[in-house]
Image (tube, rainbow, N blue to C red):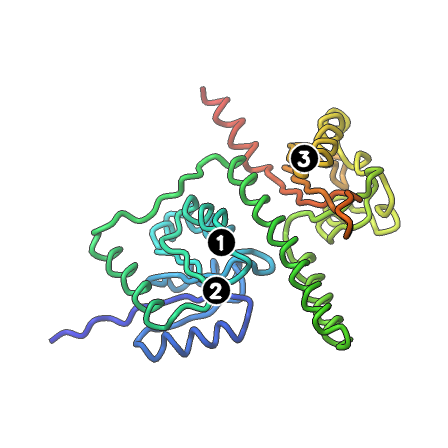
């Protein structure tokens, strides 16, 4: 009797302990397991060794789980690989909705019961191989709509991460090493994200940013700190940027497309989201958010218009 081939699983998670736990769990149940610590490493692995299924966390440095799934669905060599989210990163209904729209087959919360997890994995693989269900197709084909929903989820998760770290610090206030570790973890997350993370005060002046803004503008810290955010925005987009800032102060959240001036003086199309920053009393003291380069999306749009 011919033996069934061993199924390959790629586990994507920046937490080494979580990866090791899944590896042990799955290996002892006759799966061949590979690991990747972020989306970029996962994409490289898929090109060299195609897995039968991918199990991924959401929040990871360099490339998160949402972006990884989006990239996999764009490429013919990987678009039909079943994809499962396995995460405990402050999950809400909107997270699972976005995962489904991007084409995820399953969305499971950590920690799952061993039997449940194995059943879900086996079910997805069997259904995919038998063709009994059609592999989930992405429901978001419009790049701008994806950027909007994606940035909303990332901003939300960063805010939740800050709250969680603050709670941990308050619970262990006496542990200065824990405080330094928590602050360093948050700093690493912010700096590793490939998009621009920023914060401005009520006057519209920059008070916080990650390295991505420095890389794009070519400006050092002393050239950015305290400067009006409009100084880095294309002149014809400054009015709508101002309107978006006012809107976020009023309703708590806003988004806008506005070109960022690069270090060579050229405008780069960016999609900006902003959420109101509040103090302990609930008073708005500034604005924080994400800027995402959608150059490729604009090129595709122009090409479609040209082809008409």
First in residue order: circle 1 vs circle 2: 2
Crowding at dot 1, Cα within 10 Å, few <14 / some 14-19 / many 20+, comes out as some
Say left or right for 165 vs 238.
Answer: left
Q: Nearer the viewer, residue 59 or 63?
A: 59
**Whole-percent x and y of residue 254?**
65, 35
Q: Establish if 43 lies above or below 303.
A: below
The residue singled out by tag 2 in the image is 12
For the residues labelled 3 and 2, the Cα–Cα distance comes to: 37 Å
Identify the mark at residue 68; answer none if there is no mark: 1
Secondary structure of residue under mark 1: helix
Q: Residue, x 49% and y 53% (percent of image)? A: 68
Q: Residue, x 47% and y 76% (percent of image)? A: 20
First in residue order: circle 3 vs circle 1: 1
**Whole-percent x and y of residue 138?**
40, 43
Q: Quadrant of the C terminus?
A: top left
Tell me if label 1 and label 2 are in contact, CB under 8 Å. yes
């Amino acid at each position: 009797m011919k033996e069934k081939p061993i199924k390959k699983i790629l586990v994507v998670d920046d937490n080494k302990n979580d990866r090791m736990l899944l590896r042990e769990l799955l290996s002892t149940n006759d799966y061949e397991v590979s690991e990747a610590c972020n989306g970029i490493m996962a994409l490289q692995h898929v090109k060299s060794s195609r897995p039968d299924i991918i199990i991924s966390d959401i929040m990871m440095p360099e490339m998160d789980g949402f972006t990884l799934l989006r990239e996999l669905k764009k490429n013919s060599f990987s678009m039909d690989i079943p994809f499962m989210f396995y995460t405990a990163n402050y999950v809400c209904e909107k997270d699972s909705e976005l995962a489904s729209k991007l084409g995820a087959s399953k969305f499971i919360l950590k920690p799952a019961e061993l039997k449940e997890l194995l059943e879900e994995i086996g079910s997805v693989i069997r259904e995919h191989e038998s063709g009994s269900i059609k592999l989930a197709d992405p429901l978001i084909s419009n790049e701008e709509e994806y950027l909007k929903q994606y940035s909303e989820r990332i901003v939300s998760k960063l805010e939740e991460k800050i709250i969680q770290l603050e709670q941990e610090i308050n619970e262990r206030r006496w542990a200065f090493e824990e405080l330094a570790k928590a602050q360093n973890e948050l700093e690493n997350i912010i700096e590793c994200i490939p998009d621009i993370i920023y914060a401005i005060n009520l006057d519209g002046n920059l008070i916080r940013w990650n390295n991505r803004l420095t890389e794009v503008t070519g400006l050092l810290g002393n050239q950015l700190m305290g400067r009006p955010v409009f100084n880095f925005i294309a002149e014809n987009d400054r009015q709508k940027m101002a309107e978006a800032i006012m809107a976020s102060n009023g309703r708590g959240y806003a988004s806008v497309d506005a070109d960022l001036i690069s270090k060579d003086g050229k405008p780069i199309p960016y999609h900006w989201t902003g959420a109101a920053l509040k103090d302990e009393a609930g008073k708005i003291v500034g604005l924080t958010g994400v800027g995402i380069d959608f150059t490729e999306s604009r090129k595709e749009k122009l090409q479609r218009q040209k082809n008409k």
